[in-house]
Image: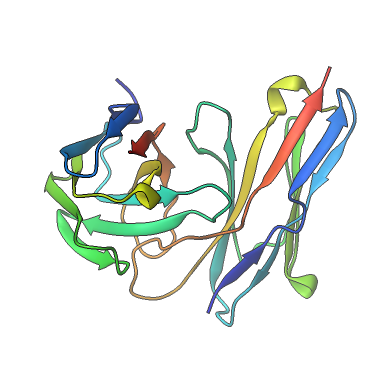
Amino acid sequence: ETGVTQTPRHLVMGMTNKKSLKCEQHLGHNAMYWYKQSAKKPLELMFVYNFKEQTENNSVPSRFSPECPNSSHLFLHLHTLQPEDSALYLCASSQAQPPTDTQYFGPGTRLTVL
Amino acid sequence: AQKVTQAQTEISVVEKEDVTLDCVYETRDTTYYLFWYKQPPSGELVFLIRRNSFDEQNEISGRYSWNFQKSTSSFNFTITASQVVDSAVYFCALATGGTSYGKLTFGQGTILTVHP
């Protein structure tokens, strides 16, 4: 595997379900990010981890819970989501030299909340 | 606050035409970085270029070229002799100095459709 991978690529869940999104980077980077891309909206930064420490939480509702066990893996745990949470969730990584190191993105997880 | 504006929501061209995607940014910082990403239908954002605020040299990479003009706060992207494979959503993004690690502000994106 190369670059940034995300699983699953598609996910359909009910509002009462609990699921997790997984991201893995194979670039030797130290910073990882979660973005949300909704239809007709700019990409929204959700969370930033640098050397496994969360450095940014962009006022994200608590029904989204990130986890970064090491610099290569990032999870987004989902529970009791709302239909408006349906979106493309993108993971990215960078070398972590603030503030401008290039971010490389994964293919995203297309989430549908019923 | 930072802002990126991509005024062109959608552009449609015929193959082999040249096309320019506009990007205008706003920031009070003197040090900043500008990016272009391509998002094909598969969904992944593909990094195309990064340019810092102290380097106004235009850049060419194959059929792609970028025109950075600080005087007009613009960072426009031109595709020469467009191809069907260029069809995608293109995003311009801005990152500035500060304590946030690589916090990017994205524009709304421009949907480019290249017809055969």
Q: Is residue B99 left or right of residue B115?
A: left
- Count the labels in the image: 0
Residue A64 visible in image: yes
Let me know if residue A72 appears in the view.
no
Residue A16 rendering spot, x and y as whole percentages: 17, 43
In x, y percent, where is residue A109? 35, 34
Return the residue nearer the eye: B48 or A92. Answer: A92
- Left or right: B60 as drawn, with respect to B103: right
Towards the viewer: A83 or A6: A83
User: Vertically, is A52 above or below B90?
Assistant: below
Q: Looking at the image, which is closer to me, B71 or A86?
A: A86
Q: Quadrant of residue B86?
A: top right
User: What residue is at 38 percent from the left and 42 percent from the top?
Assistant: A90
Image location of residue B43, percent across then percent down: 49, 32
B92 lies left or right of B104: right
Which residue lies at the image location 43% right of the left edge and 58% below the top edge? A44
**Image: B30 above or below B65:** below
Q: Which quadrant is the C terminus of chain A positioned in?
A: top left
Residue at 57%, 28% in the rendered image = B41
Nearer to us in this view, B7 or B24: B7
- The image quadrant of residue A88 is top left
